[in-house]
Amino acid sequence: MNKKHTIVTTQYRENYGAHQWDGEGECPQYWKNKGGDTYIVLSNCDCDDNDIRQLFTYSSDYSETSICGCLKVDTLKDAEEKYFEPWENIVTIGKNPDGTFTKSSSSNSESCARRGLTVYTHTHVYAKAKDHMRCEPIDYKVFYQFENDMQAHSEEEALAIFEKYYS
């Protein structure tokens, strides 16, 4: 059976009425749309509808994120070419066999704006799907690849390479 990847688009909204709210009574409502994100849920991860809802929705008196749409694509290349601009990072999320979730954000063809950098990836691991929207990872890693074939696995290593070879 050919499982397809799922493209998920989200909308982030902020309640401007809550900025001056003192916490007493009902929170004033003045919601403004502030953009959103696009994700690829990997086909090999067995994410169900509940996982997707928990990964991409959040709501409080101050802000909320909701799912705008989901659609299926055959390949990651299809997803990258059709649903991401060249300057956007490609963001994938998958469910691991142990039930944790891994999100990787990798540079696209034109998103490495810093001289000398060819690709970078930031990877977060979340214990539960809902931890993604709460920004509560249990693990975080970075990877940078440079034009001179040097690699860095931390922000400090990357900064040292930038300073030595590209400043």
Image (tube, rainbow, N blue to C red):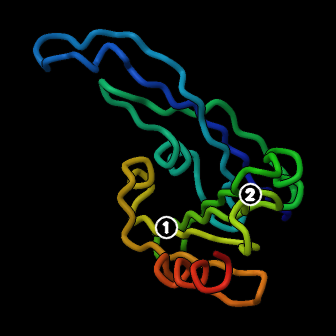
Residue 131 as seen in the image, left or right of residue 19: right
Residue 102 as seen in the image, left or right of residue 139: right
Residue at mark 2: 111
- Where does residue 130 sit, x and y in percent of width and height? 40, 50
Point 13% across, 18% down: residue: 22
- Where does residue 72 sit, x and y in percent of width and height? 80, 47
Circle 1 packing at 10 Å, graded few (<14), some (14-19), many (20+), is: some
Residue 138: quarter of image: bottom left
Could you give the CA–CA distance between mark 2 and mark 1, rounded to whole angstroms?
19 Å
Q: Is residue 78 above or below residue 71?
A: below
Name the outermost residue toward the front. Answer: 167
**Residue 104, which numbered label?**
none
Residue 18 as seen in the image, left or right of residue 30: left
Three-letter code for the amino acid on which mark 1 is drawn: His
Residue at mark 1: 124
Circle 2 packing at 10 Å, graded few (<14), some (14-19), many (20+), is: some
Residue 5: quarter of image: bottom right
- Where does residue 77 sit, x and y in percent of width and height? 87, 60
- Where does residue 17 sit, x and y in percent of width and height? 32, 13
Foreground label between 2 and 1? 2
Please tell me which of labels 2 and 1 falls first in the chain: 2
